[in-house]
Image (cartoon, rainbow, N blue to C red):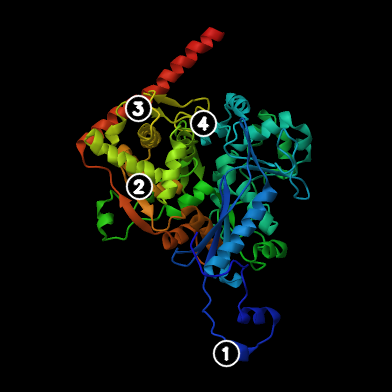
């Protein structure tokens, strides 16, 4: 959050704007009060796993101000839940404070977009929350994206081998919505009968803001098995505000035991579906506008999942032609040669293509789910930032290191990076990566999302000793980063072996701010990594939705080109020894999963 001398008040109307609203002229007052020229500002809202954030951007994609508000989360075993009421309150607080800190008046905000985790929201006919929790607590009406309660349901759905599964890598994940819906029906019958709308969180936010329950192609295609390419013939219908939901496969829902969701022209899961950035209803309702501190009627764009908003906010962030960085990139003109890494609690790997590519174990191809008229391929790792937090926070040396980091006014990870740099000279290894010669990590602590698509996969650490020092923690941290990067390399190689031609990475999200994390990824994958000029790519992507809804740009892709901007470019090491080292560790990385399969088979036989 940027510092500001402004008081933390709600957004205000300038005197001239207030006069326009009331119909009076008050020209003498305007002449005696200097007025700042009004700006065109786009507002993006991103609801992550732990907070709701708001960011304001100008017409050059520059961040004017941002604010974050915490949100509540309940975790009990495989069940992870949140409250839509709590989230909406956090969104309103974040928006008001961001506008205040950036000195942005309500009438300057010309468009608004929402992005959020792909969590499942349950509400009744009045829009009130319906519990999805064993506790029965009505506040807990959201099954969070990372919730893995529906592993059994996912396995049974995949056993049906429905044709729709070929569009999500051949199988649904327990993180998708169909398994979660089936779990609720089988375990919480009373809640199931009460729910009037099942919605992805970002769609619910747009609905809460506008009263329009049109769903996004992004959410429905990526998480609900909706077949977006059913809309291909409608792509040129620029005047269409809402699109009839023509991509549901009714046979699929009946086969898996959820045929009742077909009723009422799919009213509970979406009767209309639109491209990301399509204007919703009549914009902000008066009630929502008052809660947000904005103007009624402010255009709101159809939503995106947070990772996909990151893709929209960064994918066109390529250096200007003629720049030194531009000349070192393989093919900076081809959007289909890029992959975006949205690195946060988990990591999503987003690539687009003009033709549909079926890739086993990788989600997609999803038509127009991120960039309209392109097919999206979506790889992912279910625990990356969360894994690093877990390994570090549960280590014996963590409390002391945390105190040292606080005393130096740096993050714990910055301190670990410094420790690793000092160890290079102490141990006299040829390069930093070589410190992990004897420690290897398979990062599947929350299953493998892709390319293996095995939710039962477990994490592995090979090379532990009795050493519990801070230096040993630093080595474990580095080995975990490398394990995550080997997972990304596995995804990139797998995609390229099935038709993609990815040669450049773009990274955004919290982990992208860690130079060690990014450099290890560049060295291990062997690709240059472009970082965005503005760190808040997910917020920018959601703001772009508002920019498109407000008709400031003719298309989402045009808005991306205008508002994305490149920052630093990180190149892989040119040292052949570094490449040889990582090639060797990558082979070990792959054998760790193969060994795990062998152990699982042995134990299954023992228990049979």
Q: Is residue 18 visible?
A: yes
Q: Element under label 4?
A: loop
Checking the image for residue 515, the label placed there is 2
Checking the image for residue 439, the label placed there is 3
Residue nearer the viewer, 154 or 557? 154
* Residue in the picture at 28% in, 47% down: 571
Closer mark to the observer between disc 4 and disc 3: 3
Give the Cα distance between marks 1 and 4. 62 Å
N-terminal-most mark, 2 or 1? 1
The quadrant of the picture occupied by the C terminus is top right
Q: Count neighbours of disc 1 (C-alpha within 10 A) and say few if under 14, some if 14 to 19, many if 20 or more.
A: few
N-terminal-most mark, 1 or 4? 1
Closer mark to the observer between disc 4 and disc 2: 2
Q: Is residue 215 visible?
A: no
Residue 499, quarter of picture? top left
Percent of width and height locating residue 343: 45, 44
N-terminal-most mark, 2 or 3? 3
Closer mark to the observer between disc 1 and disc 4: 1
Checking the image for residue 32, the label placed there is 1
Residue 88 drawn above or below residue 503:
below
Give the Cα distance between marks 2 and 1. 51 Å
Residue 263 drawn above or below residue 127:
above
Residue 185, quarter of picture? top right
């Amino acid at each position: 959050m940027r510092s500001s001398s402004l008081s933390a008040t709600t957004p205000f109307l300038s005197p001239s704007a207030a006069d326009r609203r009331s119909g009076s002229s008050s020209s003498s007052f305007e002449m005696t009060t200097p007025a700042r020229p009004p700006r065109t500002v786009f507002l993006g809202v991103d609801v992550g796993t732990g907070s709701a954030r708001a960011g304001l951007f100008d017409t050059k994609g520059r961040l004017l101000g941002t604010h974050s508000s915490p949100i509540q989360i309940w975790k009990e075993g495989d069940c992870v839940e949140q409250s839509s009421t709590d989230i909406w309150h956090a969104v309103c607080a974040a928006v008001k404070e961001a506008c205040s800190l950036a000195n942005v008046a309500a009438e300057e905000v010309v468009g608004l977009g929402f992005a959020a985790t792909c969590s499942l929201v349950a509400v009744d006919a009045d829009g009130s929350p319906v519990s999805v929790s064993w506790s029965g607590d009505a506040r807990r009406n959201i099954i969070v994206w990372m919730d893995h309660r529906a592993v059994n349901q996912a396995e049974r759905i995949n056993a049906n081998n429905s044709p729709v599964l070929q569009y999500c890598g051949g199988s649904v994940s327990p993180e998708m919505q169909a398994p979660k819906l089936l779990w609720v029906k089988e375990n919480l019958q009373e809640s199931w009968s009460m729910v009037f709308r099942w919605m992805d969180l970002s769609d619910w936010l747009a609905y809460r803001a506008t009263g329009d329950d049109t769903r996004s192609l992004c959410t429905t295609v990526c998480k609900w098995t909706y077949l977006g390419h059913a809309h291909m013939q409608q792509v040129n219908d620029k005047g269409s505000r809402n699109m009839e939901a023509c991509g549901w496969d009714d046979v699929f829902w009946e086969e898996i035991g959820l045929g009742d969701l077909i009723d009422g022209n799919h009213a509970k899961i979406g009767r209309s579906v639109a491209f990301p950035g399509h204007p919703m209803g009549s914009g902000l309702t008066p009630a929502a506008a008052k809660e947000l501190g904005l103007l009624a009627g402010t255009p709101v764009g159809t939503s995106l999942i947070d990772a996909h908003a990151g893709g929209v906010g960064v994918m066109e962030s390529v250096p200007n032609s003629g720049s030194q960085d531009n000349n070192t990139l393989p093919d900076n003109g081809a959007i289909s040669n890029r992959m975006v890494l949205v690195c946060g609690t988990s990591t999503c790997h987003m690539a687009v293509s003009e033709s549909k590519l079926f890739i086993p174990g990788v989600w997609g191809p999803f038509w127009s789910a991120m960039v309209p008229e392109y097919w999206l391929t979506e790889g992912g790792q279910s625990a990356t930032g969360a894994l690093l937090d877990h390994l570090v926070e549960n280590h014996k040396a963590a409390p002391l290191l945390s105190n040292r980091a606080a005393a130096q006014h740096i993050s714990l990870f910055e301190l670990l990076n410094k420790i690793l740099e000092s160890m290079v000279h102490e141990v006299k290894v040829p390069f930093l990566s070589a410190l992990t010669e004897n420690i290897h990590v398979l990062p599947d602590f929350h299953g493998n999302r892709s390319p293996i698509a095995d939710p039962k996969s477990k994490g592995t650490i090979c090379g532990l000793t009795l050493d519990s020092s801070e230096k040993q923690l630093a080595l474990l941290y580095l080995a975990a980063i490398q394990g995550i990067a080997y997972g990304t390399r596995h995804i990139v190689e797998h995609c390229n072996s099935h038709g993609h031609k990815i040669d450049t990475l773009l990274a955004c999200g919290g982990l992208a701010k860690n130079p060690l994390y990014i450099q290890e990824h560049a060295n291990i994958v062997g690709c240059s990594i472009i970082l965005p000029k503005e760190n808040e790519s997910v917020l920018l992507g959601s703001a772009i939705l508002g920019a498109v809804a407000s008709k400031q740009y003719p298309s989402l892709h045009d808005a991306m080109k205008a508002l994305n901007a490149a920052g630093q470019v990180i190149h892989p090491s040119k040292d052949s020894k570094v490449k040889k080292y990582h090639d060797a560790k990558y082979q070990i990385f792959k054998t760790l999963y193969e060994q795990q399969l062998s152990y699982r088979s042995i134990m299954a036989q023992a228990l049979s």
